[in-house]
Amino acid sequence: MSTLAPMPAPVSPATRIRRGFADVAEGQVHYREAGRCSSDTPLPLVMLHASPGSAKGLEPMMRVLSQRRRVVATDTLGNGDSSAPEGTAPPIRYFADGHVRALDALGLERFDLYGSHTGANIACEIAIAHPQRVNRLVLDGVSLYSAQEQADMLQHYAPDVPIDLTGIQFHRIWNFVRDSYLFWPWYRREARHCRSIGLPSADELHDKVVEVIKAARTYPIAYRAAIAYDKPARLPLVTVPTLLACARHDMFLEYFETVCQLMPRASHLVTEGTLNPGALAATVLQFEQFLDGQPVQTRSAS
């Protein structure tokens, strides 16, 4: 005899995640939003997700941040429920322009901006191209690969996924997403490449796999653009107030000190991440302090 799963706890209307689509030349950009704007709330916050997956992975942060402001999180072209990008190898600035065109369609003129991993690269390009529109910028987890690392990852990290009648796409994406929690990089399945964070919950892993499967044909395109992104040349061009952040468990922590040297005027902070409710609350509070213009206590990677 089967038993019914418990009903989820009710969600406050103020922080409920709403979904929609914005029309762009390629088709549509899918977005999530929560919170409301009024005369006494801060500027809207735009959030850009990491690869692979979609803005669904940002929902826990959105629910907390939207208690004080409107939060909008867009799926990068070729990811989640957004339309496919044009071309086979567009650069990061193309994906940045895709997000900006979606924000134009949503009527968002000036905003704070957050980006994680691939989303951080895209957010960097938006801030460079539109400094008058970006009030404050949070870059959460920025890599800085050597030439050898970059070449290796371009070859192996985001391979094309065949779609066939045996369903190989489901197995390959499941293994890829799961192994990205266990190894860095995920295709180096050796003891010295093990990560220490363990697997997420079954529900979280399922949700992320589903988001990647939806974009199985196109998710590698933005991923490769992010891996190829010339951060030493581009990061110093950001002029808006910036917080460089990285979680203690983030695989990009090894690059953090060098990334900070590229942006000497930026604030920098090593956070507790978002792996559990306590860490999520602490990290979001620090981000809010920066977005509100308050001093951020600098913490190093040590």
Image (cartoon, rainbow, N blue to C red):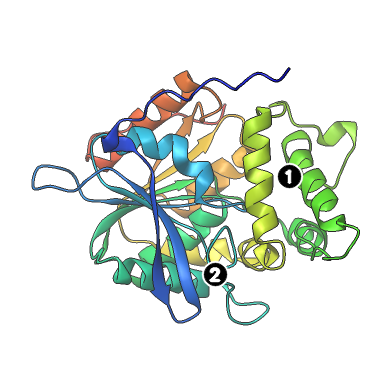
Quarter containing the N terminus: top right
> Is the Cβ of the residue at disc 2 closer than 8 Å to that at disc 1?
no
Three-letter code for the amino acid on which mark 1 is drawn:
Val
Is label 1 in a helix, a strand or a loop?
helix
Q: Residue furthest front?
A: 1
Mark closer to the chain start, 2 or 1: 2
Q: Nearer the viewer, residue 107 or 28?
A: 28
Asked if residue 139 lies left or right of residue 239, the reply is right
The quadrant holding residue 286 is top left
Residue 82 visible to an observer of this rendering: yes
The quadrant holding residue 167 is bottom right
Residue depicted at 18% across the width and 48% down the height: 37
Q: Nearer the viewer, residue 108 or 283?
A: 108
The quadrant holding residue 287 is top left
Q: Residue 35: x percent and y percent?
A: 27, 42
The CA span between labels 2 and 1 is 22 Å
Residue depicted at 78% across the width and 45% down the height: 174
Q: Residue 203: x percent and y percent?
A: 63, 32
Q: Say which mark, if any, is on residue 92.
A: 2
Q: Say which mark, if any, is on residue 70.
A: none
223 w.r.t. 274: above or below? below
Residue depicted at 90% across the width and 36% down the height: 190
Residue depicted at 51% across the width and 55% down the height: 119
Three-letter code for the amino acid on which mark 2 is drawn:
Ile
Quarter containing the C terminus: top right
Is label 2 in a helix, a strand or a loop?
helix
Residue with the mark numbered 1: 177
Asked if residue 68 lies left or right of residue 276, the reply is left
Determine crowd level at label 2: few under 14, some 14-19, many 20+ residues with C-alpha closer than 10 A.
Answer: many
Q: Nearer the viewer, residue 175 or 94?
A: 175
